[in-house]
Amino acid sequence: MNASIISGAAAAVFALSATATFAQVSDKPFQENWAPSKWGKDDAAGSANHTKNSANIKRAISMIKQYKSVTLGKYYHREIPAVGTRHWNFVLTGTPNAGPFGENAMVYHDEFVSTEIGQIGTQFDGPGHIGVNTSKGMFLYNGRMYPESYERGPAGRAEGMGPNGVEYVGEVGFICRGIVLDAAAYRGVERLPIPKKPGDPGIVTGEDIKAIIKKQGIAEPQPGDCVFLHTGHGNIWGNSIYKKMTSEEHARARVEFGAGEPGFGISGCEYIGCARYRSDGRRHFVQRCSAIRREGYGLRGALPHRDADPAWNMEHREPGSEAAGRRESLRIRIHLVTAQDHRRHGLTRKSNRDLLISVQQL
């Protein structure tokens, strides 16, 4: 038996054993027809496809009034707050790497970075990040099944997400009307508290969103808009202070950051998820969004995270919601973007520079 057959068999056994370790399965993706997506069975970019609509681009650009640029990304730092044991580390590989050269005595520097991409600094989740373990395997965006859809390298090693790699989102990019929902200002605080129980002010509900939109005097979300939720939670490691903080202060910030987060409740997710139906007529909006809510997850095709810490999920529950009291909930993270662009194929997350946002309200 040659080496390639042995390695292939080993990879197959590993894949089967990995799948077998999942005790829970859900076939809702098949029962509720989560695929194909509205963009077609071969799509890999998801809602980024709104950027292909020239009307959306025109609408976004027409709202630019002050012609100012705003930095949305956070500093990368070896002590940056992160989830779990994730890390970011940067070193110069030479001081300098080479030189001086020539008449002008040129020198140059190179660098080495070791890190996870996901949950490090500013980023958003791509179509390969979240899936559902079904009776037929892992179901991800647009009905792609894993492990067979992984991009494989030597010895069957998984080296990318294949058709669900985030590079397909990056190739389209985002040009959109940016809606900043300032939940902190709405509550009259600098930073929303981390919720401990249903009904806490750190939970942003659908009614809250409507009130914020009215208070800020902005138009409702429309298809192709980019929604940003400002809770103030990022002030824990704000750019204006983080470089000035000591290692001890960094450590406290990491603990505070990891204790949980404010964010959208179930009804808030439903409200944002139904935005694309509001412009289609009231009757269709009511029918479609009622169907979405019956699914229980709030958004068709959106999936729940499960965490061991119930307090982590608590911020996304509300009194009377279908998910209240259960150890599962829909979690939507609104990640801003940095000026760094990861174009490595097959990634599950992305930090992106291909973004132009016309911010209507700061």
Image: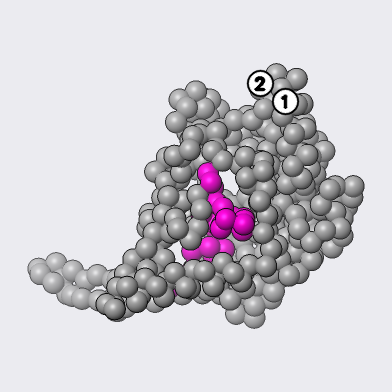
Which image quadrant is residue 11 in? bottom left
From the image, tell me which residue sits under label 2.
280
Q: Which residue is drawn at 73% across and 60% down?
A: 261
Left or right: 30 in relation to 231: left
Helix, strand or loop at label 2? It is loop
Question: Mark 2 or mark 1, which is nearer the start of the sequence?
Answer: 2
The percent position of residue 174, horizontal first and vertical second, equals 48, 39
Contact check, label 1 and label 2, Cβ < 8 Å: yes
User: Above or below — where is 161 with respect to 205?
Assistant: below
Q: Disc 1 and disc 2: Cα gap in Å?
A: 7 Å
Which image quadrant is residue 154 in? bottom left
Give 223 or 161, whichever is nearer the viewer: 161
Q: Which colour scheme is used?
A: one colour
Left or right: 110 in relation to 162: left
User: Above or below — where is 316 with respect to 217?
Assistant: below
Give 91 or 209, whichever is nearer the viewer: 209
Q: Quadrant of the C terminus?
A: top right
Residue 125 in sight here? no
Does the magenta portion include 86? no
Q: Residue at x 55, y 37 (%)?
A: 37
The percent position of residue 259, horizontal first and vertical second, equals 73, 69
The percent position of residue 175, horizontal first and vertical second, equals 48, 36
From the image, tell me which residue sits under label 1.
285
Q: Which residue is drawn at 35% across and 75% down?
A: 7
Give the magenta range.
114-143
Left or right: 63 in relation to 42: right
